[in-house]
DNA sequence: TTTAGCACTCTTGCTATATGACTGCTAACT
DNA sequence: AGTTAGCAGTCATATAGCAAGAGTGCTAAA
C-alpha cells in the first residue's frame, strides 16, 4: 500500500495517540501535538481517505478514529520506531541481564520477567521444540527393581528424562543390553524418530521381549511429545491495562492463555521475529502476539512472546524485545 | 455458640439463599421457600439477634442480611450438608476417576480437573513436601564429561532429579566414589538433612576436592527446597463467578494465586481436611480455601485445595471433596 | 488544494423524580 | 411472653430530560 508522506504522518499520529489514550482520536487533537502543519479540516479529509483504505475505523458517526487491524499492520511494518527506549530502561534491562545465573534457564526467566515488568504485558517463554533435535545418547538407570529412568541427551545439550515402570523385575544386564540397542539404533537420529517402527526393529534384531520394550518406547515418545515447558509472567499485571476493565475481555484473555495450543503453534515458528496482530490470526481476536527466538550466545533456547491488547505499545515492546534479544545473543554468559 | 433451632434454620436459609443469589437476603424472601412457619416480622427479630452475635451483616440500613465470616464458619461447622451430590454428579465423578492412567500424577490431575469442572472454582494440587521424606538412595549418572545427573529416591517412592554442572572434567571413578560417599552418609536420613554440614563431613572424611562437592550439594539442596510442583486448574472458569464482575476483585484473586507462598503454607498442613474462610487467615481476604489430603490407596500424593469467593457453595464443594477423597483412597488404581 | 464555518450527530454527565425493597419499631393479638 | 400486622423511614435503582461538549462531513471561499 502506497501512502503519501502526510498520510503516513497522520496515521502514525493516530496510532500513537490511540495507544496512549485508548480513546478515539479526533482531527483536532493531533495537529499541534504532532506538528502536522495543516488545519483540522485537512486532517479530516485525509482521515476519510485513510478510512476508505481500511486503515482507520470509527466507533460512531461523530466519533474520532481508531486504527484498524490493517492500520496497526501498516504501522508495525512501516512506521515503527524500534529504538524507543530511554536511558533508564536500558540501564534497568542491563542490570537485570547481568544477574549471576547458574543456568541458561535462569537467564530466560530473568529476561521474561524483565520484559513483563517494562512492558506491563504478559510474557511467555517456551523451550525449543525437542523433536527437531538430534539424539546424542540415551542412558538408562535402574531405580529399584521395576523402575527405569531414561535420560536423553541431544546434540545441542538438552536433557530430557522420564521414568518407566514395569510389571516385572528388570535386571541390570537387561538394562545394559537395552542401552546398547537403543544407542546403536538412535544415535544421531532426530528425536522424532523414536516411535513404533523401532519397537519392531529391536524385537527383530535382538529377539527381545516386547513387554519390556513397549513401555520404554511409549514413555519416551510421550515425554518427547509433551508440550514444551512454559514459563509465563505478568498475567495479573496485564489486567492493569484499561481494556481489561471489562470483565468480558479479561476472561477472553485468560481463556487465550489457557488455550495453550494456539500460543504454542504461534511461538513455535522458525523465523526470528514475528508480529501477529489481532484478528490476522483466527483465535487471537482482540490480542496481539509478538515473538522472537530466544538465542543466548548463539544457542537456541526457544521462543519468547509477549501478548497484549491489539492496541499495545508496539514501539516500546518491539524496542525492548530487539534490545534484549541482541544483548542475550551477545553472550552475556561468557 | 449456642443457637436455638429456629435461629439455626434461619441462618442456614440465609447462607443458602445468599450463596445462590449473591444478594442480601430479606426476611420476606425466605419464609415460604424454607418453610419457616412464622411471619417476616419474627424472622426480622431473629435477624437482629443473629446480627448481634456477629453471624450476619448488613450492607446498608435498609438492606437484607449477608452472612459474616463468623456466620460462614458456623454454617460450615454445624449446618452443612456434606452429602449434597445428585446422581448425575456422582456418575460423572465416577466416570472420570475410572479413566485409565499410567501414573498416580495423572490421577491427581484428573481429580483436580473434575473438581474444578463440578464446582466451577479454581483447584490446586501440590505434591507432598519432600523435605519430610527419607532418602532411600542417591544415584549419580555422568552425562558427557562435565555434567552429572543426581537422582534421589525416597522411601515412599518419590523421585527427584537434578543436573549438576562442573567447570572441569569429572571421571566415572570420581562419580562412583561420590555415589558411595553420599549414600553412606545419607541413606535413611530425612531429605532436609542435605545441607552444608555434609559438605564439611565429606571433605573431612574423604579428603575430597571441595570444588566438586560444592556444586552437588548446592544443586541438590536447591531442588529439594524448590517449591513442590503445582497443578492448577480453572482460573478462567472461576472468573465466571459473579463476584468477579468487578475487575478489582478479579485482580485480587489472580494476585492471590500468584502469591504462592500463602497458598503453599495453607495447603501444606498435616490435617486431612481444612476449611479456611475469608479473613480468618490474613491474606486470604475475600476468598475461602478448602483443602484435603490427596491419598490414593493410602499413599500420600500431596494436597488438593479449592479456592473461591467467601460465599462459595460450601455444601457442594465439601460434598464433592469428601466423595472424591473417599473414592481415591479406596484405591481405584488397584 | 487548503481551510473556515456551520449544521448535525452522538456521547456524557447531571439532576430530579418516581419506585420499590427493606428494616425497625410499636401496638395489638393469641 | 411470644408473635404478628402495620407503618414510617431509609436507601438503592431506574428513568427521563436536559445541557454541554466533542467530533464529523459538507460547503463555499481563499
Image (spheres, coloured by chain):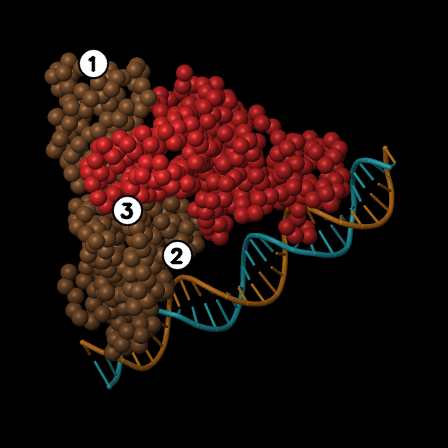
Chain colours: A brown, B red, C orange, D cyan
Residue A180 seen in this snapshot: yes
Q: Which residue is mark 3?
A: A103
Q: Residue at x 29, y 61 (%)?
A: A94
Q: Label 2: chain?
A: A
The CA distance from mark 2 to mark 3 is: 33 Å
Residues at circles 1 and 3 in contact by the CB criterion of under 8 Å: no
- Residues D30 and B247: in front is B247
**In the displayed structure, does residue B32 sit left or right of residue A94?**
right
- Residues A39 and A168: in front is A168
Mark 3 surroundings: few (<14), some (14-19) or many (≥20) residues within 10 A: few
SS for tag 1?
loop
Checking the image for residue A327, the label placed there is none
Q: Residue at x 35, y 32 (%)?
A: B182
Residue A17, horizontal then vertical, whole percent: 32, 66
Number of residue marks: 3
Q: Which residue is mark 1?
A: A209
The CA distance from mark 1 to mark 3 is: 40 Å
Q: Label 1: chain?
A: A
Q: Label 3: chain?
A: A
Checking the image for residue A241, the label placed there is 2
Q: Nearer the viewer, mark 1 or mark 3?
A: 3
Q: Residue at x 37, y 22 (%)?
A: B99
SS for tag 3?
loop
Residues at circles 2 and 1 in contact by the CB criterion of under 8 Å: no
The CA distance from mark 2 to mark 1 is: 59 Å
Mark found first going from the N terminus, 2 or 1: 1
**In the displayed structure, does residue A208 sit left or right of residue C22?**
left
Indicate whether B316 appears above or below B334: below
Mark found first going from the N terminus, 1 or 3: 3
Quadrant of the frame with the N terminus of chain B: top right
Q: Nearer the viewer, mark 2 or mark 3?
A: 3
Indicate whether A255 appears above or below A4: above
Amino acid at each position: 500500500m502506497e501512502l503519501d508522506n502526510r498520510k503516513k504522518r497522520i496515521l502514525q499520529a493516530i496510532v500513537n495517540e490511540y495507544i496512549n489514550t485508548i480513546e478515539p482520536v479526533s482531527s483536532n487533537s493531533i495537529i499541534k501535538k504532532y506538528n502536522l502543519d495543516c488545519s483540522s479540516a485537512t486532517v479530516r479529509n485525509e482521515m476519510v481517505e485513510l478510512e476508505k483504505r481500511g486503515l482507520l475505523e470509527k466507533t460512531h458517526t461523530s466519533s474520532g478514529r481508531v486504527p484498524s487491524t490493517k492500520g496497526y499492520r501498516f504501522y508495525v511494518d512501516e512506521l515503527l520506531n524500534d529504538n524507543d527506549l530511554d536511558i533508564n530502561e536500558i540501564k534497568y534491562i542491563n542490570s537485570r541481564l547481568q544477574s549471576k545465573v547458574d543456568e541458561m534457564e535462569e537467564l530466560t526467566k530473568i529476561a521474561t520477567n524483565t520484559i513483563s515488568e517494562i512492558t506491563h504485558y504478559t510474557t511467555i517463554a517456551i523451550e525449543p521444540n525437542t523433536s527437531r533435535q538430534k539424539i546424542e545418547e540415551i542412558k538408562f538407570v535402574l531405580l529399584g527393581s521395576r523402575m527405569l529412568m531414561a535420560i536423553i541427551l541431544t546434540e545441542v545439550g538438552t536433557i530430557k528424562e522420564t521414568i518407566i515402570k514395569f510389571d516385572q523385575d528388570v535386571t541390570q544386564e537387561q538394562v545394559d543390553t537395552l542401552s546398547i540397542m537403543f544407542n546403536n539404533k538412535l544415535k544421531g537420529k532426530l528425536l522424532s524418530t523414536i516411535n513404533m517402527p523401532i519397537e519392531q526393529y529391536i524385537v527383530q534384531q535382538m529377539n527381545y521381549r516386547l513387554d519390556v520394550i513397549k513401555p520404554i518406547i511409549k514413555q519416551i515418545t510421550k515425554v518427547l511429545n509433551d508440550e514444551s515447558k512454559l514459563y509465563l509472567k505478568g498475567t495479573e499485571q496485564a489486567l492493569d491495562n484499561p481494556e481489561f476493565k471489562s470483565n468480558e475481555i479479561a476472561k477472553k484473555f485468560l481463556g487465550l492463555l489457557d488455550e495453550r495450543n494456539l500460543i504454542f503453534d504461534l511461538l513455535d515458528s522458525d523465523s526470528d521475529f514475528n508480529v501477529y496482530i489481532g484478528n490476522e490470526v483466527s483465535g487471537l481476536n482482540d490480542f496481539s502476539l509478538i515473538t522472537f527466538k530466544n538465542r543466548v550466545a548463539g544457542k537456541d533456547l526457544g521462543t519468547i512472546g509477549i501478548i497484549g491488547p491489539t492496541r499495545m505499545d508496539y514501539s516500546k515492546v518491539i524496542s525492548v524485545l530487539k534490545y534484549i534479544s541482541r544483548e542475550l545473543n551477545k553472550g552475556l554468559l561468557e
